Image (tube, grey):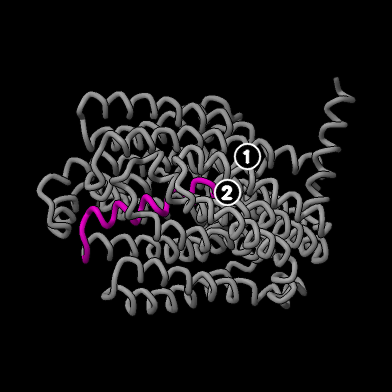
Amino acid sequence: MNSRQTVFSNLIWRFMERCGAQLVSFVVSVVLARLLEPELYGTIALVTVITSILQVFVDSGMANALIQKKDTDNLDYSSVFYFNVAFCLVLYAGLFFAAPLINRLYGHTDLVPVIRVLGLTIVVAGVKNVQQAYVAKTMQFRRFFFSTLGGTIFSAAVGITMAYSGFGIWALVAQQLLNVTVNTAILWLTVGWKPQRIFSFKRLGGLISYGWKLLASALLDTVYLKLYQLVVGLKYTSSDLAYYNKADQLPLLVVENINSSIDSVLLPVLSAEQDRKETVRDMTRRAIKTSTYIMMPMMAGLAACAEPLVRLLLTEKWLPCVPYMQVFCIVYAFYPLHTANLNAIKAMGRSDIFLKLEIIKKIISTLLLVASMGISVYAIALSQLVSCVTSQLINSWPNRKLLDYSYLHQLRDMAPAILLSLAMALCIRPVVSIGFSDWTTLLIQIPAGVAIYAALSALFKVDSFRFLLDVARKMLAGKHSRG
């Protein structure tokens, strides 16, 4: 069983890794956005629609099966490794030869080499995938910290240098390809596990029987998310797609730091406790309460500060992305709820339920997309908000029986964070209208928002506020005792 200290230690390593990587990526995205035109970002986004869908076959299903299986051994890891590498080579070969067709579909004249070079990320990720599963299974999340930061920093330096040198779209391509390549190389050198010359179709079949449902679920989810980008890119302009994507990236930058940290640590921890229903329920409840307490004010604050923040960081040319960003802030504020519910379902071994949920959600969301696509890009963004609400209900429904933890109970646990975040945002939003400079506006809004949220949390004795203070005190006490 994982002790509380081990769980929090790995959560902190994962959180540090995500924060470090996202901070560097954020700086790089700001620099590149100021150097390059929105149309170039729209072009890359069109290519990544295809590569992201293929990436699902690398990142999902089998890795989760390795983590969820109780008695995973070297034969399991090695069998999945060889299968993954071979499958990724087949995927890349298909993409390589389909590049001219994709180019014609998009109506471009110069995407073929971009598709073929950027597609190499699929092969590299196939080499890395099992190493990642091994790190997660054995709770060695500090390995992610060094590999991710190494890849992010190196690729950032190369990407910015190429952008300044006038390489245009190839600066974005090089950044993405080098990021995953260096990340993989560091992980390969530092993680203790290496594939052996052993393989078992029987073991592989057992893992596939669990993993294929998660793979299908992830594929549905990715195709659905990329479908939004594809519709915007094909029905509207490349600039519209760039604004839509950039609006999504900024709140996602904040969300990934917290949500991916919780997601990657929570699944192996819950899987280890899958036979103890009450423990899984209590851990799921704590994950929802704590993560939403942190996420909600960040998203509410970002929505309130969106206009001066975009103008200051990305310049006036990116201001059309502000309305989309405010919608996405609301969508992402509830992501911890999805993550905790779905991880509980996966940890209980119910990948069949997981797949059914994804099918239902994607049917509803696709209908919403079809209804909105002819109206405007903003209507498409709003359809994601409606989809978010329906997905909350759908994702939480199975845990009403699996864990005796219904959506109403979950909503009650989230209510303090929702209400306090809304109050904080309403207090700081009027500052934008006063007429201060962007720097001054943000320097007033951000500290005021933090102070208001903390004061209201203390005043109303919010459980998650006291929980985080207690964890911080214990960690400091442990640090002092070791010193």
Q: Is residue 343 highlighted in magenta?
A: no
Point out the image quarter for the C terminus. Answer: top right
Q: Are marks 1 and 2 in contact (CB under 8 Å)?
A: yes
Q: Secondary structure at mark 2?
A: helix
Disc with the residue nearer the chain's start (1 vs 2): 1
Query: Within 10 Å of the Cα at label 2, are there few (<14), some (14-19), or many (20+) other Cα atoms?
Result: some
Q: Residue at x 47, y 43 (%)?
A: 436
Q: Which residues are magenta?
A: 235-255
Q: Secondary structure at mark 1?
A: helix
Query: x, y (%) of residue 398?
Result: 66, 75
Query: Within 10 Å of the Cα at label 1, are there few (<14), some (14-19), or many (20+) other Cα atoms?
Result: many
Whether residue 75 is visible to the viewer of this picture, yes or no, is no
Whether residue 198 is visible to the viewer of this picture, yes or no, is yes
Q: Nearer the viewer, residue 432 or 352?
A: 432
Residue under numbered circle 1:
14
In the image, residue 105 above or below residue 254: below
Query: x, y (%) of residue 325?
Result: 43, 56
Residue under numbered circle 2:
260
